[in-house]
Structure formats: C-alpha cells, structure tokens
Amino acid sequence: MKAAAFDYTRPRDLADLLRQLAGTTDAKIIAGGQSLVPMMAMRLVRPALLVDINDVQELQNITLEDDCVAIGACTRQADVEKSDTIRQHLPLLARALPFIGHDQTRNRGTVGGSLAHADPSAEIVLVAVALQAELTLARAEGERISSADDFLAGPMTTTLEEDECLVAIRFPRWTEAGRLGVGFHEVSPRAGDFAVVAAAAQLLLEEGGVCRRAAVAVANATPMPVRLTTVENALLGAVMDQKTVGEAAALADALID
Ligand code: FAD
C-alpha cells in the first residue's frame, strides 16, 4: 500500500519547528523515516501533516558534558556509531549500535527516532533504560525533562505530547575511578533484524575486581526494556569471578519471562 495523503513542512530551525508544532493536532515528526515511512505505507499511521526535522541543525550534535554525553535527537545512528566521544565515554551505546538494522538504515535512522518510536526490542531504548538516560522534550511554551523509564509508557507508546519534540538525550557517563566493562548481546533470526531478546550490562570494577557500580537490563523479556535491579544489587561489592557471574545469571533468569 501507499501512505494516505498528507501535508508536509520542513522547519529551518528549532524555534520554527516548535512554532509549527504548536496547536497542531494530527502532525507527526519525521526524522530518518526508517520506522515512520513503513508505518505510513502500511497505513498504520495517517498523519495529516509531516513535520520534517532534518534541516534543524540544533538537533544534530554529540556533546561531552561533565557527567553525561548529550546527543541531539536528530543525530544519525551512524554518526554516533563512528564517534570517538561515544566510543570513549559511552562504550555500551557504541557496542549496541551495530546491532541496529543495517548500515543503510543507520545512515538515516536517528537516536531520537528510535526512542520516540519506542519499539520494545530497540537497542537504543535498551541502553537508554540501562544507563538511565534523561530526555529533553520541547514545545513552544518551554521544555521538560523526563527519565527514559517515564518517557517509555509501553510498546510503541511514549508520553510525548502532540505538540512536543524530543530534542536531546543525555546518557550518563560513569566518571568514578575504576575499570569499566560492557556487554551487549542479542538473539535475532538474521543480522539486522530486531532482537528477539537482548541484554545489556555495564560494570565498574575497582582494584581486586570488586564491583562498585552495575547496570543490567533486558529487552523483550518483559513488555518494555527493564533494569534488573535485583541482579545489580547482588553484584555490588562482589568480586566478579565465575561464581558471582553464574549466580547473577541464574538470578536474571528467574526474573524474566
Ligand atoms: P522516524 O521513522 O522518522 O520516526 C519514528 C517515530 O518517532 C515516528 O513516530 C516519529 O514521529 C517519531 N520521532 C522521530 N524523531 C522525533 C523527535 N525528535 N521528536 C518526537 N518524535 C520523533 N531499529 C532498531 O532499534 N533495531 C533494529 O534492529 C532495526 N532494524 C531495522 C531494519 C530495517 C530494514 C528498517 C527499515 C528499520 C529498522 N529499525 C531498527 C528502525 C529504525 O532504524 C530506527 O532505529 C528508528 O526506529 C527510527 O528512527 P528514525 O530517525 O528513522 O525515525
């Protein structure tokens, strides 16, 4: 099928974008189009107005801040994947990105689009939950901050208001002394497919291999990606040896469907 008829607008900056969104009732933002266009072609969504944000430069950036890395919502996944700042300061996101679709989709798909689409198996959504990312949402009247957990209301469902735009995502970076380790694994029928199930972990170890900080999260083993805080707490203060890892894995297994 083909998309139902729609009007189209292409704001030239953030102020123009928020002005055009104000007061709209049946508009959809289009970023990379990698999820929205197939949804429109299948007539799963029929927006009356498409607001194309690809010219809004304020939404395309990767910025190292004191305690986080801020990523503009319309930053391409491929640019994040190639970024030295991400590789150095957000190794878990760097590890997850190659699992998203294909080079072609990552060249167009954006970080904000993945979160706003809120597919429960999306790798960026899983990392945002694991690292407790904060999202900045803007409308003509002003901005608000939401945690990833609060923003993601359910499968393909967010708390985004009709006239709001996701403008930035802040992924906390762990700056304490110690050795940082990450793991990202997913099971999917073919490379590039969405995950049947995925798991993400980031650990900070101090001398002697004692775990000082842990983030462990799963996707598609629960309705939305979720942190396994019981597992995280079991790891804190433990020496990361095979016995500890085995016990943590058994605990995770008991917590998921
Ligand atoms: P769009 O498609 O433009 O928009 C998606 C949704 O988000 C729309 O509802 C849109 O209105 C909204 N939106 C976008 N940006 C904003 C914003 N700034 N503020 C408010 N709302 C916004 N994704 C994965 O996670 N893992 C995969 O393995 C995967 N495989 C794929 C394979 C193929 C062949 C294809 C075509 C896609 C795949 N995707 C996958 C989905 C896609 O690549 C993106 O990850 C993402 O879901 C869409 O990003 P986008 O920028 O293209 O968003």
Image (tube, helix red, strand yellow):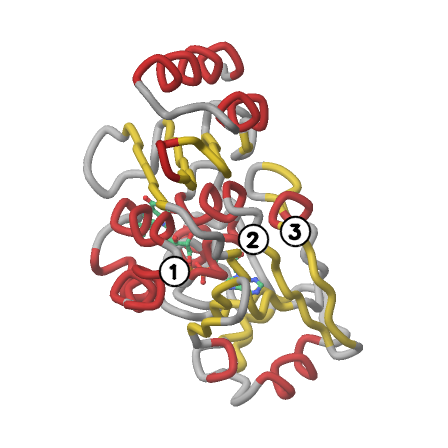
Number of marks present in the image shown = 3
Whether the residue carrying mark 1 lies under 8 Å from ligand 1 is answered with no
Asked whether disc 2 touches disc 3, contact meaning CB atoms under 8 Å apart, the reply is yes
In space, the residues marked 2 and 3 are separated at their CA atoms by 6 Å
Q: Is residue 202 visible?
A: no
48 shown above or below 218:
below
Front of the two marks 2 and 1: 1
Label whose residue precedes the other's in the sequence (2 or 3): 2
Q: Residue 199 appears at what percent x and percent y? A: 39, 31
Residue drawn at x 46%, y 71% as measured from the top left: 64
Q: Which residue is mark 3?
A: 147
| Residue identifier under label 2 | 133
Label 3 residue SS? strand
Q: Position of residue 74 (x, y in %)?
A: 46, 70
**Number of other residues with Cα within 10 Å of mark 1, as a class: few under 14, some 14 to 19, many 20 or more:** some
Side (left or right) of 172 relative to 186: right
